[in-house]
Image: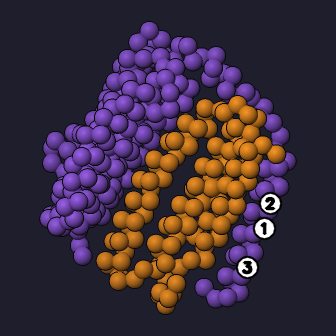
Amino acid sequence: MSTGLLYALAGVVLFALGAAGVIVLAHLLRKILAFNVMGSGAFLVLVGLAQRTGVPDPVPQAMVLTGIVVAVAATALALGLARAWHARTGRGTLTEGEDRD
Amino acid sequence: MNRLARGVTVGVGVALAVALVVALLELPAAAIHLPGTVAQHLAQSGVEHPVTAVLLNFRGWDTLLEVAVLLLALLTLLTLSGGQAAVAAVEADPLLQGLARKALPLIILMAGYLLWAGAHRPGGAFQAGAVLAAGAVLLQLAGLLPAWAAPGRLLRLGLTLGFLVFLAVAAALLGQGALLQYPPASAGGLILLIEAGLTLSLGLILAGLFLFVTGRRA
């Protein structure tokens, strides 16, 4: 097993962890964090698979570079939306009665 | 969410992880050899580093659209916060302020170096822009730079400059037959021009994602 494949496998585990987190966690901040964990997992899969043969492939690396910057912007937007939601409703969750998470 | 639904979701998550791991282990070798294709065309791309060549030449329109996405995210954030006046910066630690003052010239130098290095080694507009944005955030946290209010004309120009330069180059090159196909002779210069604009704009946009939002509405 090459190091690249090991990275990709770790990425897959992170992705599934984040995906479950997005659904299970009620608080919006935690959902956004879980979403970021998912994204990091996807990046790790792309970068890991790109070098599993030993020669790094520049195309997925460029895609991940693009993706990281977009992920930062998307996270900022999500945080802004969560703030606006909190300012409007006073809640940190989307459904009522789940604030304890 | 009740305990049953929670348990089922976690179970599905574990199943997803196992399925993806199995799929990765069984993955066949790539049918096309992209690193070879990139290496083959690297000489006419105008830069020597394959990642920069992919980002700004072979897949330039991806990058163009990405900058548009970043601008869109910032515009949406600005719409959300409704252009209220920014709160004055808080009094901060003099040690942090001194450090930020000393670090700032180095941060700008580093951004310039990364921009220049992108042509032949890891680096480029995105890394340089991120370093610039980090510098602005550091200044804000140290209390040296107030949070930004609604952007004035100059800041608007700075935020969109990178995208506009990129778009102008793309429009000027439409005559070549394909989108963003640079003539090999001037590719290096055009890429540097685009990257310089992008560095400034990305730095401002990424900093804006923090500075437009921070300090407003307690």
Whether residue B211 sits left or right of residue B88 in the image: it is: right
User: Earlier along the polypeptide chain: callout 3 or callout 1?
Assistant: 3
Subunit that carries the residue with mark 2: B
Check the rendered structure and report the hue given to chain B: purple
Residue B123 coordinates in the image, percent (x, y) = 46, 33
* Label ID, residue B15: 1
Kindly identify the residue that appears in the image at 65 percent across and 61 percent down: A14
Q: Residue furthest top?
A: B185
Residue type pointed to by label 2: Ala
Check the rendered structure and report the hue given to chain A: orange
Residue type pointed to by label 1: Ala
* Label ID, residue B19: 2
Label 2: few (<14), some (14–19) or many (≥20) C-alpha neighbours in 10 Å: few
Residues at badges 2 and 3 in contact (C-beta under 8 Å)? no
Subunit that carries the residue with mark 1: B
Tag 1 secondary structure: helix
Residue B17 coordinates in the image, percent (x, y) = 74, 63
Figure quadrant of the N terminus of chain A? top right
Label 1: few (<14), some (14–19) or many (≥20) C-alpha neighbours in 10 Å: few
Residues at badges 2 and 1 in contact (C-beta under 8 Å)? yes
Residue type pointed to by label 3: Val
| Residue under numbered circle 3 | B8
Label 2 to label 3: alpha-carbon separation: 16 Å
Label 2 to label 1: alpha-carbon separation: 6 Å
Q: Is residue B96 visible?
A: yes
Compared with B1, B40 (above or below) is above
